[in-house]
Image (cartoon, rainbow, N blue to C red):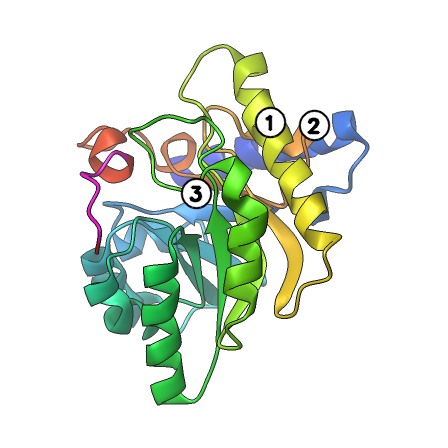
Amino acid sequence: MSIVAERLQNITERVTAACAKAGRVPGSVKLLLATKTVTPAIIRQALINKRNYVGENKVQELTQKYPYLKSEDVEFHFIGHLQTNKVKEVTKYAHCIQSIDRIKLVQAIDRQMQKEGRSINVLLQVNTSYETSKFGIDPEDALSFAREVSAYDTLKVKGLMTIGLFSAEQEKVRKCFRLLRSLKEQIASLGLPNAEMEELSMGMSGDFDTAIEEGATMVRIGTALFGQRQYPDSYYWNEQKQNS
């Protein structure tokens, strides 16, 4: 058994335990492989499910890896900050964009989808930790933003995404996840068009147990499965904010 397979087994056991603690069925939680800097050969070692979910932060990595994994039963999600000038490139390969955080981006995606005559699944990213270094809409703006996005037929809102507080104090992290779940329920109650609100993408290697307890339907696992990266998480998450 490879080290990736061993780690995957351990993660699966943790998911099962967290689901049991929360009174949930393990199958209700999807495992999204956060594959930044990971080669296709290594990624394949973790593709053991009938449906696998792969998440990329960088446009270049998504475009480079797609040809090597497209024959697998893989659904690609883009989970990094997306600039409007990269929309055409990302929508070629991503089945879902999890980082919808501003109307300018929504409009750019809408234009591209109208050109292609199709739609794309998206998640709205919420900055539940209120950290200025992170992208995402403020929680107080989530409902109004959801209303705006739902007016675009080419974007199918499937739920919400957040990056929890980077803290060893799990109860502080838990508040972020609890807030996202509350926002999901509030938006779902609005009955908006083009908004099914099925997914809560929250929780990463250090906190996914807590996220599952708070209702996560998708957890993004990278380090716990593939090991430490060459670059710190800040290289991928705390990008310099731009208006594009």
Q: For residue 137, which numbered disc appears in the image?
A: 3
Give coordinates of residue 179: x percent, y percent: 61, 31
One can see residue 119 in this view: yes
Give coordinates of residue 177: x percent, y percent: 58, 30
One can see residue 14 in this view: no
Circle 1 residue: 209
Between label 1 and label 2, give the one nearer the viewer: 1
Residue at position x 28%, y 68% in the image: 87
Chain-order first, disc 2 or disc 3: 2
Q: Foreground: 39 or 158?
A: 158
Residue at position x 35%, y 66% in the image: 69
Q: Foreground: 122 or 18?
A: 122
Separation (CA) of disc 1 from disc 2? 8 Å
Q: Foreground: 214 or 76?
A: 214
Q: Residues within 10 Å of mark 3 (few under 14, many from 20)?
A: many
Q: Secondary structure at mark 1?
A: helix
Q: Is residue 118 above or below residue 198?
A: below
Q: Are marks 1 and 2 in contact (CB under 8 Å)?
A: yes
The kind of residue on which mark 3 rests is Ile
Query: Magenta part mainly helix, strand or loop?
Result: loop
Separation (CA) of disc 1 from disc 3? 24 Å
Between label 2 and label 3, give the one nearer the viewer: 3
Q: Are marks 2 and 3 in contact (CB under 8 Å)?
A: no
The stretch in magenta equals 238-243
Q: For residue 17, which numbered disc appears in the image?
A: 2
